[in-house]
Image: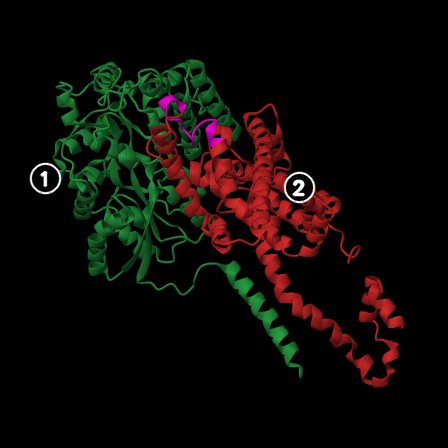
Chain colours: A green, B red
Amino acid sequence: MKNPLKVLTALAATATMALGLSACGGGSPQATTDTITYWASDQGNSLDDTAAKLKPSLDRFTEKTGIKVQLEVIGWTDLYNRILTAVTSGDGPDVLNIGNTWAVTLQETGAFEPVEGALLEAVGGKDRFLQTSWATGGAEGKTPTSVPLYGLAYNMYYNTKMFKEAGIEKAPVTWQEFVETAKKLTKDTNGDGKPDQWGFTAAGASVSANSHQAFIRGLQNGGTLFDADGKPTFDSEAQVAGVKQFIDLMATDKVMSPSDAEISQGSQKIDNLINGKAAMLFDQSPVKNFEARGFTDWGVASIPMMEAGATGDVSTQSHVAGINLSVFKNSKNKENAIKLAGFLTSDEEQVALNKAYRSLPVVNGASSDAAFQTEEVKAKRDALANHALPMPLIAKEGQMETLTGTAIKNLFAKAATGTVSESDIQAALKDANNQMAAAQ
Amino acid sequence: MSHSAIQNSPANAAETATMPAPEQSGKGPELPARKPRRSFLPYGLIMPAVILEVLIHIGPMILGVWIAFISLNQLNLTNWLNAPFVGLQNFVNGLNPESTIGQAFFSTVGRTMLYTVTVVGFSWILGMAGAVFLSSNFKGRAILRTFFLVPYALPAYVGTIAWAFMFNQRDGAVNQILVDTLHLFGDERPFWLLGGNSFGAMIMVNIWQLWPFAFLMLMAALQNVPNDVYEAAAIDGATLWQQFRTITLPMVQPANGVLLLVMSLWTFNQFNIPFVLFGAASPKEATLVSPLIYQNSFGSWNFGLGGAMSVLLLIALFIASIFYIRMVLPKGGDND
């Protein structure tokens, strides 16, 4: 080995090989035991706002246990794919938030720690929790792999100033009243012959929000997304009728601006309400946006039902919405990760966090706090306790949301640029149904 | 003498590399001893590159092909090495023209071809016009040249998101100019990112982003065309159009061949622009192949189907590229 070039070559080859091998190994083995990583979903007005509101809680956790938490807040558009990547590589955070409708899909991957033994003990057992929220933790009859963290539900929010101007004294209760009220609120204010103020606004291009409406409106009309055997029934008569009611708000009732077909972010529809461009909307938690903008002229009511005082499935106003918490099975700090899960679901932290994010505590011990006695929170709690069903607890939930939500997005696009007939709706849902059936 | 003959033939050159040349007998005795060591050095030298190439390029590609033959979904994602082998099932599902998925795939491939031809065609024409225009000397040439290159220099994401804002129906700049200022469309505000218009809008953005590249490449090629050829042609009475057709075009032909190939491959695989303009789900009228594969893989966690579509795309582009390279590009060695 006199030739320096040869030595260099051999070194380079060895180094490259070593590099390749270590890259295959993945993960850093020297993870210290006193720091854990936590992926939080975006619950505030922005990623920074979410982090700032979470920080006091995490500081208290570090103070109490000596465990440091490395926090990363991830936006909703990225969270699902980030989790997917973590699941595939087995290299993820120790603790993470998930949208509770993904719980069963993610449970099936086997990447999350089942809620039993030490984890179940740390969160204080099942009975502490709101039972409707607890039920979203995993598939029926299986050990859940996530615990509820924040509770959410759909309510109707309206601009009280616009209601007053139109002489409307009370919020509509039935769907028919809702459409009539919305028509009264839709008007041309600048005299160009075209409406510029609308009765209702929605994020017509938001796939997940659309899929929630397919679920809720379907149930209210006596339909379901899946039959008893688990076969998709997106295009059943009742489902088509339910989706038609929602699309008709733009297509035939003309109480929703065609521009809404381009809205993909929930915050844009909230802007419409604040700016007086639209009077009513359905949302899970717009209050933090109202407060950030200093907007006070808002009121809250339940999501309209087909008949006042309805009970059972046809009285569904919301899916059991919310955020769940999971511990990653591959965590090298499982013991500490479990401690964080227990801490964040404790009564005190539930009060602090849900107060900050304007969501609903998911443990019974926190609900009595004065912060959760407002009309808005009560309406949310009533919807969650009495008028909410979980989105289908199936492994292909994500696909169901994508297919139904995209079908509705395309129908709104069609309504905005032309007309939509009942057979268009039927055809779009049939298409989605076929794709769902093919994938099962 | 025989030495120069050998150099011209690659086959013979290889022979001499492995055989110790008998003519070099001047350095006699050491040569046979060198033989085994000599064969390691070239391999050792390219080894790092080969290993990295396999790890970064070939490995994932083979993995992608393999995924097309297995049923990979969320149930077995963590344990993907044990996902069940399903043979050609994914291809059957994706290609069955009777099924919703198959129909979507075929119409998407057709749409993507139309898209590619339109985008590359317009980009080439604009690039060529710009290059010819700037090849003559005039004041302000340098400024214009920089100006033309801006879309190419901007990060693709930034440029596209600006277009998305401009195309917004309610308060986008496009409708403000066309409807509010010029009062076109009878004061009806058209949607540019929904329905049929979305395809045209996407083409616009892509041409805007791609044509500076054609401009840059063609400008470089034009600089190799000697000026006296044009002068001679002008003296012979050739019009500008004749000069362009019989001098410029043939002279930039080699650069053109590569340019069109590269631009077509990029455009056919376009993903960024539709993803930023429309989000994860493109409008039906504007779905291209890459976003469709993304929707199938990530929207519905059906990686097998996404993999099968990718493999088909790979094969199609591979065959098209080989055909194109053999037909159009200059053959190495013949003309130089």
- Whether residue A423 sits left or right of residue A169 in the image: it is right
> In the image shown, does B2 or A383 lie closer to the viewer?
B2
Q: In which quarter of the image is the N terminus of chain A?
A: bottom right
Q: Which mark is residue B241?
A: 2
Residue A423 position in % (x across, y down): 45, 14
- Whether residue B105 sits left or right of residue B154 in the image: it is right
Residue A154 visible, this orientation = no
Q: Which mark is residue A370?
A: 1
Residue B70 position in % (x across, y down): 59, 40
Residue A120 position in % (x across, y down): 29, 46
Q: Are marks 2 and 1 on the same chain?
A: no
Look at label 2 and name its amino acid. Trp
Q: Quadrant of residue A272?
A: top left
Specify start and end residues of the magenta stretch as a single range: B185-199
Residue B106 visible, this orientation = yes
Task: Name which residue lies at 33% across and 56% down.
Answer: A37
Above/below status of A93 relative to A197 = below
| Element under disc 1 | helix
* Chain of residue at mark 1: A
